[in-house]
Amino acid sequence: MRRYHLHIMILLLALYGCSPNKAEQERIKWQVTLSAVDKRPYGAYLASNSIKYAFPAAALEPLSPGFRYDKMDSKMKHNDDGRSLIIFCGIDFKLSEEEWRNLKQFINNGNEVMIFCSSLDEKIEKDLSCYKEHGDEIPAGYYYVQPDLHNMDVLRIEGTPGRRYGYEGRSIKGFFSVEIDSANITNKEDSSDDDNDDNTRIYVPDTLGYANDMPDMLRYRIGEGHLTLHAAPLVLSNYFLLQPGNVDYLNALWQTLPKDINKIYTHNYYKRSASKSGLSILWKYLATRWALLLAIFLLLMYVLFEGKRKQRIIPIIAPLKNDSVSFVETVGRLYYNKGNHANLADKMVQQFLEWVRTRYLLNTNLLNENFIHQLTIKSGQPETTVREILDMIHEIRLKSVKIDDPYLYKLYNTIQLFYKNNHT
């Protein structure tokens, strides 16, 4: 029972050592996740739950963080019953070329896309002639709250004229700089230009929100739908929305979207890579591709040949022990305790002679000079030791000596010494 108590104590100590200390817990508390289920300050639990109240008639469907838009099905691209909306919420927003083409096609079909990000993909910036400024205000890792009075009264949005919003938290001062590129951007008054190669026409953006009077919320018309960019994803954080009056900012933000939306996809990605996965990156290069193929081939060979049934390991059976000596010693202790030394000495002599017969195959009926000579040769013991034992045996048999404790002790030690020094 003590052993189990010790194991439990060690386990508890290990768990205590693994648990974060108070300082680490404080850092974790202020981690920026923008997760829809995170109720910590920089989670997005409140904003995610506000969507169903802003669009009560729309069906909500959360997408997994790893969802790829190059696999969009026709049902998602074409909403025959109305208009669909995808809300992206995270920090770094990256897309592959095929994903970006699919998203533009999704918008072109009359749907809406809203992207909250701190860092925008370069291919999107180039296509829209729109560049994100101050995109590094949210580094990875853990953070403290870092109160910043410069983030008070920073934001304003169309629909709430004369009001400004902010909080004493991390930076929300990111904005966009727009450089109109006639090759990619079409004026609203000009609808005679041919469509782009992917059948989507991008129009000059509308500015719907500002950060320090710089545009932080832009809406592009692409075909029949719209793409909305927001440069401050932390406006969706619980910490921002719990400040007095900031919930009005979120309501005004949702009100800028069309009212006939009947399907909403939410995508919380935090940091989104343009690559599908780490495996796809490895598969992209010839050397790593062959290394993976070789590893898979070797694994299959191992399973094929090593998976066969093998003969069970034959257990090692220990040889039987000769416990006769131990038995005699036990019996001898009984005789010794009763004080019958003569009988005990006789039993010790009988046991010794039996051992000699069994081990050296000698006849013990005649304990003469010839026997002494043969036992000396076979045992490798000095002749004096052999002769001493034989003399004591004769004394015991002839009862020519008083067998007391010292004599019995000498007999026992002499025989034991003979056993230990035996070399054959």
Image (cartoon, helix red, strand yellow):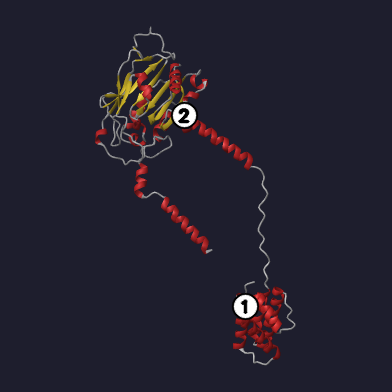
* Amino acid type indicated by mark 1: Gln
Left or right for 407, reference 179:
right
**Is 100 or 73 nearer to us in this picture?**
100
At a point 72% along the width and 74% down the height, the residue shown is: 361
Question: Crowding near pointer 2: few (<14 within 10 Å), some, many (20+)?
Answer: few
Image quarter of residue 160: top left
Q: In this view, does 168 lie above or below 98?
A: below
Residue that sits furthest to the top in the current view? 192
Residue 324: x percent and y percent? 68, 74
Left or right for 4, reference 195:
right
CA gap between label 2 and label 1 equals: 79 Å
Q: Is residue 58 above or below residue 44?
A: above
At a point 68% along the width and 49% down the height, the residue shown is: 311
At a point 41% along the width and 35% down the height, the residue shown is: 35
Mark 2, residue position = 285
Q: Quadrant of the C terminus?
A: bottom right
At a point 44% along the width and 54% down the height, the residue shown is: 14
Dot 2: element: loop
**Is 228 or 293 nearer to us in this picture?**
293
- In front of the other: label 2 or label 1? 1
In the picture, the disc for residue 178 is: none
Question: Crowding near pointer 1: few (<14 within 10 Å), some, many (20+)?
Answer: some
Residue 58: x percent and y percent? 46, 25
Is residue 63 shown to the viewer in this render? no
Dot 1: element: loop
* Amino acid type indicated by mark 2: Tyr
Mark 1, residue position = 381
Q: Do the residues labelled 2 and 1 touch (CB within 8 Å)?
A: no
**Is 34 or 320 nearer to us in this picture?**
320
Circle nearer the N terminus (2, 1): 2
Residue 62: x percent and y percent? 47, 30
